[in-house]
Image: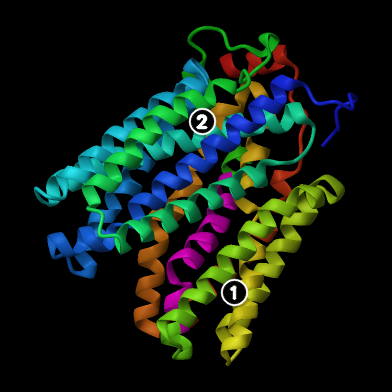
Amino acid sequence: MRRPSSARPDPAVTAGVRATYAAFVSTGFVFASWASRIPQVRDELRLDPAQLGMVLLAIAVGSLVSLPLSGTAVGRYGSRRTVTFMALVNAGSLCVIAFGYLAGVVPLVIGLFGFGFAQGAWDVAMNVQGTVAERRLGRAIMSRFHAGFSVGTVAGALIGAGAVALGIPVWLHLVVVAVLIAVVVPYAVRGFLPDTDETDALPTGTAGGRALAAWREPRTVLIGLFVLAFTFAEGTGNDWTSVAFIDGYGTSAAIGTLGFAAFLGAMTAGRWFGPAMLDRYGRVVVVRSLALLGVVGVVLLVVGGSTPMGFVGSVLWGLGVSLGFPVGMSAAADDPTMAAARVSVVASVGYCAFLAGPPLVGFLGHQVGVLQAFTSVAALLAAAFLLAGNVRTIAAPDRADDDIALTS
């Protein structure tokens, strides 16, 4: 990525970067705040694991409904307005969850659907803004924004754990978080940069056409499949690493949690320090190397035979999956005039892994064991290695040619 010629960064760009960090940290914080109270919600409703899984599916369904629509929304209203509106929807949904679970499963599911809907559109909009900030700054920093998301999840989880320890009711905890999100996020994202330059602005009515056109682009769909592979690998690590240590290696729950923490720590570190590698070696070389590193980590965890080797495998796995999703978002947004539409497509395809991944690994784990089920992760990372050529940086096409292609 070309570096800007000016030694001093534009203050507007600096403000845009900070606002983007705020958006990523906030969505991670609000999601982890909810997740930290799932056990109490489960106990209140007396849900067994299968029932809880079906209830939580409402979040994934809400996200998958909003993702295809979000490209049009961002293209028409801009990323700042979309994040602002979805933060308010998110806060309202969190209040429905806070009081709804006390009334029964149906109100809870309604709240979770709205929560997932808002999270999905918020995700696309902030990733579009992340690519704008990255392009204006002249450095590959998208992965650091995603590291900010991880920091937000850690903060939300720690505060949630503290709320549980102090006996703070679920409804009070979630309402406080909802108020914070509703107040802080709209203020924080005022520094967002314009999604496109004036010369790239979309003519009225073309946002929907671009969104549909993006679904017909082979490169965009292939980037989506690339992201799906990395998302599956990341989601599986999040959901099943601690279980694999406990069931596969016979460790205590505390050691299993440490194995999961090692995975998260490595992934966060990879996202924070990854931009230097991307600037130096380019997207394709870096993500292919990391995909291979992830395969080695997964295989080592499966066949390592000892807890220390399992920890090494977890670290390599976390590093291996760290940059796949953010690089896919950057690649989808190479052309600013099509960024919203393409990011929406890539996110829609990639997020299918969140819907299908946990039950698939659970089914395989029931048949052959959780550790052995991780071979599916290695297979998808190998596929990501083959698809990595599609994330190579491309120059934005001539605007006139782009308009002709849209109307043809």
* Prevailing secondary structure of the magenta residues: helix
Q: Nearer the viewer, residue 346 or 157?
A: 157
Side of 278 where 16 appears, left or right: left
Q: Nearer the viewer, residue 217 or 133?
A: 133
Residue at point 62%, 69% (across, down): 317
Q: Nearer the viewer, residue 81 or 75?
A: 81
Q: Quadrant of residue 163?
A: bottom left
Residue at point 39%, 64% (across, down): 358
Label 2 CA crowd tier, 10 Å (few <14, some 14–19, many 20+) = many
Residue position marked by numbered label 2 in the rendering: 125
Question: In the rendered image, which quarter contains the C terminus?
Answer: top right
177 in relation to 243, above or below: above
Residue position marked by numbered label 1 in the rendering: 314
- Magenta region: 224-245
Residue at point 75%, 43% (across, down): 392
Whole-Å distance between the Cαs marked 2 and 1? Answer: 31 Å
Provide the secondary structure element on which disc 2 rests: helix
Q: Which residue type carries mark 2?
A: Ala
